[in-house]
Amino acid sequence: MLEEGRIGTNEAIAATVYFLSSKLFISFPQQMATVGLTAAWMVPIISFGTGALGFLIVAALLKRYPRMSIVEIGEEVAGPLFGALAALGYLAFFFAATILIMREFSETVGTALLPRTPLSVITAVFVLVTLVAVFLGGEALTRAAFLAAPLIVATLVFLNSLSLPQANFDAMFPLFGPGLGKLVYHGVLHSAVAGEVMFLGVIAPQLRDGHKLRMMGLVAIAITALFTSVSLLVFVTVFPYPLCVHIPYPGYETTTLIYVGRFFQRVEVAFVFLWVISGCIELGLGAYTSTMILARMLKLPVYRPIVPAMAIIGYTVAFVPPDVPTATRLDFELVRTFGGIAVFVVPALLLLVAQVKEARRARRRGRTRGA
Amino acid sequence: MKPLAESLQANLDALKQTLHYGLNSDVIVREFDIPTTPPTKAAIVFMEGLASKDIIDLAILQPLMLISNLDRDLRAADVLEIVERRLLPGNQVSRKDNLRGIVEGVIAGTTCLLIEGCRTALEVETKSWEHRGVSQPTAETVVHGPQEAFNETLKNNVALVRRRMRTPDLVSEILKVGTLSRVDCAVLYLEGLTNPKLVAEVKRRINGIRADQIQDTGVLEQFIEDRPFVLVPQTLSTERPDRMAALLSEGHVGILLDGSPFGLVVPVTFWSLLHAAEDHFLRWPFGTFLRLVRVVALAVALLLPAVYIAVTNFHPEMIPTDLLLAIAATRERVPFPTVIEVLIMEVSFELIREAGIRVPGVIGPTLGIVGALILGQAAVAASIVSPILVIIVALTALGSFAIPNFNMAFAARITRFVYILFAAAFGFYGIAVGVFIQMMIYVSTRSFGVPFMSPIAPFAQSSGDLILRYPSWSMELRPAFLQTQHRERQPEVGRKWTRSGGVDIPSPSPPEQPRQGVDAGSQGRSGSLKVKGGGRRA
């Protein structure tokens, strides 16, 4: 059985928060503004709310099979073939999301920090860092996430509070943007923005306090929803709706407007520094989760031998989208739209099958006893 | 293990052969007669320079040679018994019945007494050699606190620790290390407090060392650490007995090696490498301030040159215009790119530092002048480096000197060059990637099974002794990661006097009358001062 370190409650929550929220630093706000208009900040609340409901199903499934990951549960409940198909679905979600986020992070670094460095070099560095992180393991990654947690909190708090002087709160109105119905529709449709919470289902056997898994997921989703929503509120008030949808990285653009006296007026580089660390953690977690899913699916005793192969595939696939707008569109319209099926609907089906199977077993037991 | 024979001559021959008597000028074999009737042949064997001549003369030879009232008809075993119990006034006498035990004792400084007809020898404690006295610490100096440091004698070092921990539970187990050197290594811990698994692991690792000689704890450290290829130290090296005693009381294990003036404490965490003994000897706000200064120092020592390169090469927009123009003006005549400039200065500084340690003491002060002149003034005047870089390198040096642990400072010095290269290649992106990799390495490192970044990652309840130093009376718990047998270090109310009522101290002067409009109660008791401690947990 693949056993890889022990992960504590705090570390698991911190890692999940990083996993869920790092996309805030790339094109996610722009996508939210595109569908939510002036009410962009409400969409993540609905999406994360839906995601939380989906996670409750995942947690209920995991509770039935303690010390098993979502991959093994799939095989246990639906048999090897359908279990493997389910695992492939999770793998596709995590792998695609990680690669597209890596591409977007690379583009952000290229735009903001290294305009003359080839994108392939920036991405190669990200791949190498991710490789190191995955080699060092999930235990180290989650601990690094917890250690760096104050970093992301401080970044968001500073970014949001220092941007406030530029905010125009009239831009919040009309309050419900395209209308409540559309908001709910887009929020539910893109519930896969909370899909990374399934990470907990993959590392479930490694959790020190497995019985707190549901709490971990819900706390992580709540924290992320709060941060995301507040940050989006700041973005749409700093860059009113029509402008916001044309800015690829609103988070970065907001930092360029920060002015704290004559000395601190070009601080965006410092923020990008922190984002890169967040990005590295996010990519490490994404790659680690993908690798673990594959290793569990193939019943490998160790996962490290497949890491270099995954890295090469990831690096290659990252350049499939011809440009960053395509990558962004693929992320939002494909991964975040249909990803929900893989990470929330499939576990719901598995839970249903598990319940039916158990009911049948109970009936059979009753019949045997009666005979 | 060859047993001793009854014949004295046979035993002496075997010993002489093993100790290369004749070739080895410091092996002394003194044969004599115990004046019984008829005389009993005996001999002592010892190493000159390791054994005390005074003890040998006065406490071994004198009583044995001058006392003549032994009955010759006694059996050999009885002679041995009488000699041991009545005639050897030495404070430590033990029996040895094999050649190897005797040889080990003799080369460690004891004196071996062999008697004709006895299959057992007596080993008298006579260890005494020239050694340095207890002196002031050189690597861990403090302004406030004890000024004693370990020296090269193991027993002295153990005594220095024991003097600070007068509890019978302080155990010092002696193990032998090195197949050739066979040096004594003391493992110190508190029985009933320290995690027995940790003690067993320390002993397992030390017993598992296969090396011909271990001369210093610096070598020992390399044999027992978890990850030899990680730059950061995984044991805490200290020359201060007070620091070792404090860490033992937390549940750590101490390791002392004969011949080494530095002790090791395990396990170690990242935070303890930023601590100094003085932190606890000062009041808590001062201790906390010093620790924050050290955190800044570590950041400066690691990152400052790299940040300078990143800012000047990749992100000049970060610098306010006036400062940017000033920097540009100073760099105008410098022909090298910034990274070369930084490397020249850093390498020169490392040269000065290394030369400063190796140079004979008399020339030492001149080195500072040469370094300051060449690196500071002349390099700037010759337009090899810019003045601002001299400031950067000086600040970086100060930062690395402010790191209290020598090994940690070393790790920072080397890692700094990696950051310089990362920054030269990718600017802030490279630095951020470097910070992430370093963080990952740190969180995956362990020291004797304890995660290096404990108790933050993984998180465990701690007593406020990491970056901030809480008041001494509020540190009630021992570190959770040590898994000690007792978590509580002191009761919740450490200043019990604050709960037992105040003490009335008579005022020397007549009390002031309360002014009108001011509540008389707020002035305290009339004519006396109520001494009370504040704070719920005080």
Image (spheres, grey):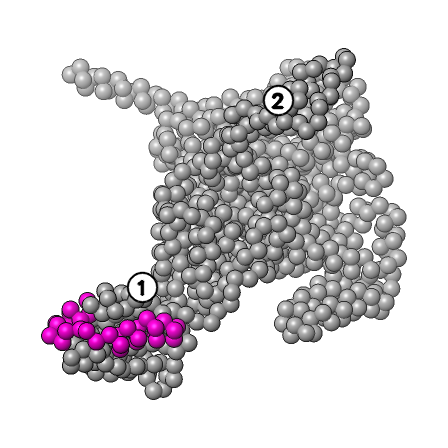
Q: Which residue lies under the disc numbered 2?
A: A45
Quarter of the image for residue A208 reads top left
Image vertical order of residue B477 relative to residue A59, above or below: below
Same chain, labels 2 and 1 = no
- Is residue B75 one of those drawn in magenta? yes
Would residue B439 be found to the left or right of residue B7 on screen?
right
Real-space Cα separation, disc 2 to disc 1, in angstroms: 79 Å
Query: Horizontal and vertical percent for residue A177?
Result: 71, 18
Q: Which residue is depicted at the point 62% across and 24% down? A: B530
Quarter of the rendering occupied by the N terminus of chain B: bottom left
Residue type at the position of mark 1 = Gln
Q: Which residue is depicted at the point 36% across and 56% down? A: B173
Q: Which residues are magenta?
A: B52-81
**Where residue B92 is drawn, which disc sits there?**
1
Indicate the chain on which mark 2 is placed.
Answer: A
Q: Nearer the viewer, residue A204 or A354?
A: A204
